[in-house]
Amino acid sequence: MSIEKPLREMVQAELRGRLAPMHKAITRMDERLAVVEDLVGILKRLAPLTKRMQSLQLALPGLSAPGGPRPRSAVVPAARGAQAAAVAPVRRGRPPAAEGKRCAVIGCKRPSRSKGYCSAHYQKLRLLVKSNRRPDKWVDDASPQSVPDVVLPRGRAASKALAEAAPQRPEPTAPPKPKAWVRKKGGKERVELR
């Protein structure tokens, strides 16, 4: 007698029992994919209408599309054998009107971000303000390509420049008063501690 046949039947029964929930889920998903295919067909039929609605919105600014604001990008997943219908994503970032304004520093090709400067030169402006070395031409909201660039010293030269830019402290005229008077052991005169 061979135990191969009963062992095989036992393994098959165990696999059927373990895989039954997954098989049910796959059949449910297959039913739902049929609905997705129908939705893709509807979207393809409505595509010309959405293009006309967009042109109407551009022509008549007060007109709004039914259903509220349009999402940034709407992508329908591809069903079996069907191609996905996708709406072009809306561009993120600054609006196109502010995009043409360039950085205020002469020769910089980056767009301005805040106070007329690109992000790198705005950080340099903040450093100059913090260290009291801001040049007169570096003003807020400067016009594009109107401010000469400043080359900041580095290393020892930078520390010297910071020391020169720092406000000078006046020299004390009188020595400070001692905090305490102490008599030395065995002595008669007092010694001051500072």
Image (tube, rainbow, N blue to C red):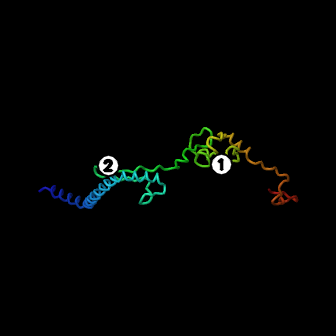
Q: Earlier in the sequence, mark 2 or mark 1?
A: 2
Q: Nearer the viewer, residue 179 or 31?
A: 31
Left/right of residue 46 with respect to residue 95 in the rendered view: left
Looking at the rendered image, the quarter that the C terminus falls into is: bottom right
Q: Amino acid at mark 1?
A: Asp
**Residue at the spot of label 1:** 140
Sort mark 2 into few (<14), some (14-19) or many (20+) by Cα contacts within 10 Å: few
View extreme (right): residue: 188
Residue 147 percent location from the top left of the image? 65, 41
Q: Residue 191 appears in which quarter of the rendering?
A: bottom right
View extreme (front): residue: 60
Residue 177 percent location from the top left of the image? 83, 57
Left/right of residue 186 with respect to residue 126 in the rendered view: right
- Marking on residue 99: none
Residue 164 percent location from the top left of the image? 74, 44
Sort mark 1 into few (<14), some (14-19) or many (20+) by Cα contacts within 10 Å: few
Q: Amino acid at mark 2?
A: Gln
- As helix, strand or loop, the secondary structure at mark 2 comes to loop
Identify the residue at horizontal 45%, vertical 54% (top origin): 57
Calculate the distance from the C-alpha at mark 2 to the C-alpha at mark 1. 52 Å
Looking at the rendered image, the quarter that the N terminus falls into is: bottom left
How many numbered circles does the render carry?
Answer: 2
- Marking on residue 83: 2
Identify the residue at horizontal 62%, vertical 49% (top origin): 115
Q: Does 106 sit above or below residue 27? A: above
